[in-house]
Image: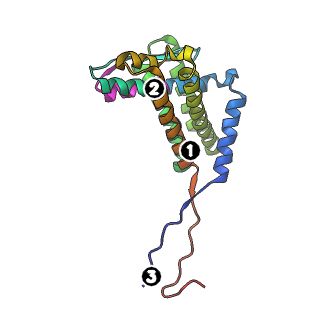
Amino acid sequence: MDSPQLSPPARLDVGRLLLLVAFVAVGLVFWDSPLLLPVKLLAVMGHESGHAAATLLAGGSVQRVVLSADQSGACLSALPPGVWRTILVYSAGYVGTAVAGAVLLLLAFRWKVARGVLGAYALWLVAVALLVAGSGFTLFFSLGMAALLGAAARWLPLFGVRLLVLFLAAFTGLYALFDLRDDLWNPATRAHSDAALLAAQTHVPALVWAGVWSVLSLFILGWGAWMALQSAAPPQPELAPGREPT
């Protein structure tokens, strides 16, 4: 009687790891370069979109999303009363950016749907621009980036599209970590952050929310990176019926 064949365990893909490290290194080296400002603003838009999505899930309505060239942003919305709704919406900014980074890593490395990712990016930005953009800068940035990403999805060769999506994935995760450090663990900025706003609503100290969001974000990014960097081990040859391995 044949024994069942077990699936080979996944293994760390060293090539993927080196590529991810290279993109993170590029992000760190050129962090202050003006060339990366549009990518940073995309990450900020992801933060504010996290608030907007959570508002809709909680039964509220999004009035406007505002983005500024100095990398600040705001999502103004109307939310029904309720502590859990409030916690969900306020938490969805920082944690939502980490989720976006993890999902992008998985899409880029595991499912390889690069053109679809850029197309979804473009549609999301067009929706923000047409439905909830709260300033001229938000409108023009969203439409401009949507046009660029849409053009890249349409005309870049597949290799270039994949590299662009991998860079966006790595940079989004990196920005999420810097955002946590700069906004939540600097006492001066924490006093004006989402953590302070939620503390005023829940009477739970801002430092506690900073800790909870940081732990959750690190776990999500770590899990996403680990899963994205796994690849299936090569299949083992099957034994002929009735034979034993030598």
Residue linked to disc 1: 225
- Res 67 visible: yes
Which of the numbered marks, if any, corresponds to residue 182?
none
Q: Residue furthest bottom?
A: 242
Residue 145 location, x and y as percent? 55, 25
What amino acid type should be assigned to the residue bearing mark 2?
A: Val
Per the rendered image, the range of residues in magenta is 47-62
In the rendered image, residue 59 lying in the magenta stretch gets the answer yes
Residue type (three-letter) at the residue carrying disc 3: Asp
- Image coordinates of residue 97 in percent, x first then y, are 50, 31
Q: Which mark is residue 208?
A: 2
Under circle 1, the secondary element is helix
Q: Quadrant of the C terminus?
A: bottom right
Number of marks in picture: 3
Please tell me in which quadrant of the rendered image residue 233 appears: bottom right
Foreground of the two, 39 or 172: 172
Please give the residue where the numbered disc 3 appears in the rendered image.
2
At 53% across and 49% down in the image, what residue appears?
Answer: 227
Marks 1 and 3, how far apart at CA: 37 Å
| Image quadrant in which the N terminus is located | bottom left
Image vertical order of residue 242 relative to residue 65, above or below: below
How many residues crowd around disc 1 within 10 Å: few (fewer than 14), some, or many (20 or more)? Answer: many
Query: For numbered disc 2, what is the local secondary structure?
Result: helix
